[in-house]
Image (tube, helix red, strand yellow):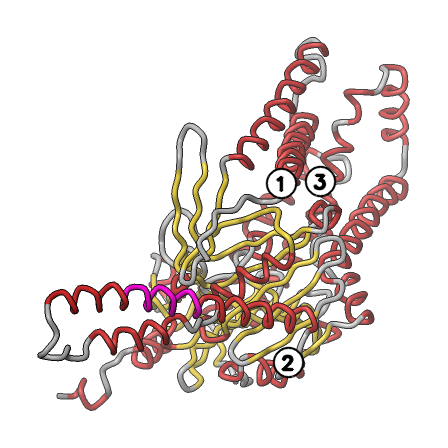
Amino acid sequence: MNEWKRQHPASIFISFLSNLKQMIITLIAVFIFGQSAQAANPIFYFIFFTGILLFSVLNGFVSWWKFYYNLKSDELQIKQGLIFKKNRFIRKDRIQSIDINAKLVQRLFGLVEVKIETAGGGGEPEFRIVALKREEALKIKSRLLNKHPVSAASHDLNTRENEDPSEESTEEETFQEGEVKNDSEAAAVHLAEEEFDDHLEETIEETIEETEPDEQWELGSRRLVIAALTSSGVGIAATFIAAVVSQAPQFLPEWLLDQVIGWFIHSSILLIGSLLVIILFIAWLFTLTSTILKYGFFKLKKNGVDIHISRGVLEQRQLTLNSSRITAVRIVQSPIRQPFRFVSVYVESTGGGTKEEDLSTVLIPLCKREEVEELLEKFVPEFAFTPVYEGLPKESLRRYMIKLIVPAVALSATATYFLPYGWFSVALPLVAAFIGYIQYRAAGITAYEDFLCIRSRSLSKTEVFLPKKRIQDLESTQNVLQKMDDLYTVHVSVLTSLMGKTFSLRHVSGQQIEDRYAWYSYETPEDGNK
């Protein structure tokens, strides 16, 4: 296959919408954080943003016109750029994962987006083709993730080339034989590529028909609703809504603004509290809807070493992860889910992570804590165990509590002095002390066979299973206050996607640090005594 192709022309419109989305986000930011809505003449803004939109359309057309890709047997070649031309070659042995998405815009045209994660520490860990037919996307995925038979034909040809020629062959016969051999080689490679293309077509048909997987699991509608109801994104949404509401006075007439301010001044605490509850309720509805749209139709399947994840209502996402490239498993339990023993399971891997999930991939959006080991046994069996954690020394308790109590006392004193109802904040130090206590109680560390397991809590409780062979770095730090009690902070780094990720646990005892170093060291105890 040696044919340069373009994307679907719909990529022009998709690029335009992407730029329009960024412009809308910029306008919202200006609206929220801007000082005045009258900073310039409205005609200026109209001309300015119209120019940006026209430039976006032109840029989308040039990007489509000057973008070519060529799918070969062992790599994907890309040429792009009008003024600054760029060539990129993505070899199949460097590919970590291939993600096929169908966002709402792509679905309008019957197209998908292909995202390819590659290994290495360069500045371009991923590559996107935003508008392809689904069959073409599956063809790219099949060719770049699977072996092809061309190598076998090449091996046979190389074997024939290494055979000794007949001693009776003349120079002219040898030359003619070389021509025939070259023709035979070209024909054999061409035949092998045709056979592989036929194999690709069969693979694509099997993919569309969804052959029976080795293991599979579905989130289900009941657990989807529970995951949405207990989502932890309410605080972020409430902050955004409150920021928008805070800018509303700029657009109210003075007589109405005076009435609103007067109403707030003469309102009771109950009315003000009710307004806050309404804001939180709106934020909760927003989070509820976004979670359902994100994790709707969630399915988890495994074929061999490949884990296939599909999810999404408006944006349909399909991700394939190689289980052998998983570097850690993370189990997260939010305070809302803890009474019901529900958790989420994430995997850290060299490919496939998303920014909104902190470069991780959601393996199981919601399940009971006691179900985790059984589910991991199906999909990543090497991580299927339930460790028993070793708690932190009693000297660590006051470190966890003091770190939160001191700022809480300062905030409470300031609020009491300056705000009419600030005396309500005297409860903050007690809340901070309680949070510090439960952080101490949740913290733990242990070595389970060839895994280092860390449990910690900020608000959500997190467990991390780190294979010894995947740990890039294990170190400890100690500040002046920790030195008084012989306490340390342990840091463990693993490789994820483009960059590494570090997990830390504060206020670990000196003996626990020594035990972890002895476990991680390749030197046996007998060697250390010699």
Q: Amino acid at mark 2?
A: Pro
Q: Which residue is mark 3?
A: 240
Where disc 1 sits, the SS reads helix
Residue 264 is situated, as x and y percent measured from the top left of the image, at 86, 31
The residue depicted at 55 percent of the width and 52 percent of the height is: 355
Contact between labelled residues 1 and 2, with CB atoms less than 8 Å apart: no
Q: Mark 2 or 1, which is nearer the eye? A: 1
Any magenta on residue 186?
A: yes
Q: Which residue is mark 1?
A: 11
The one of 514 and 313 positioned closer to us in this rendering: 313
Where disc 3 sits, the SS reads helix
Q: Which residues are magenta?
A: 182-191
Residue 367 is situated, as x and y percent measured from the top left of the image, at 70, 75
How packed mark 1 is, by other alpha carbons closer than 10 Å (few <14, some 14-19, many 20 or more), is: many
Label of residue 3 in the image: none
Q: Amino acid at mark 3?
A: Phe
Q: Amino acid at mark 1?
A: Ser
Q: Is residue 471 above or below residue 372?
A: above
Between the C-alphas of marks 2 and 3, the distance is 42 Å
Apparent side of residue 360 relative to residue 529 in the rendered image (left or right): right
Between the C-alphas of marks 1 and 3, the distance is 31 Å
Q: Is residue 491 visible?
A: no
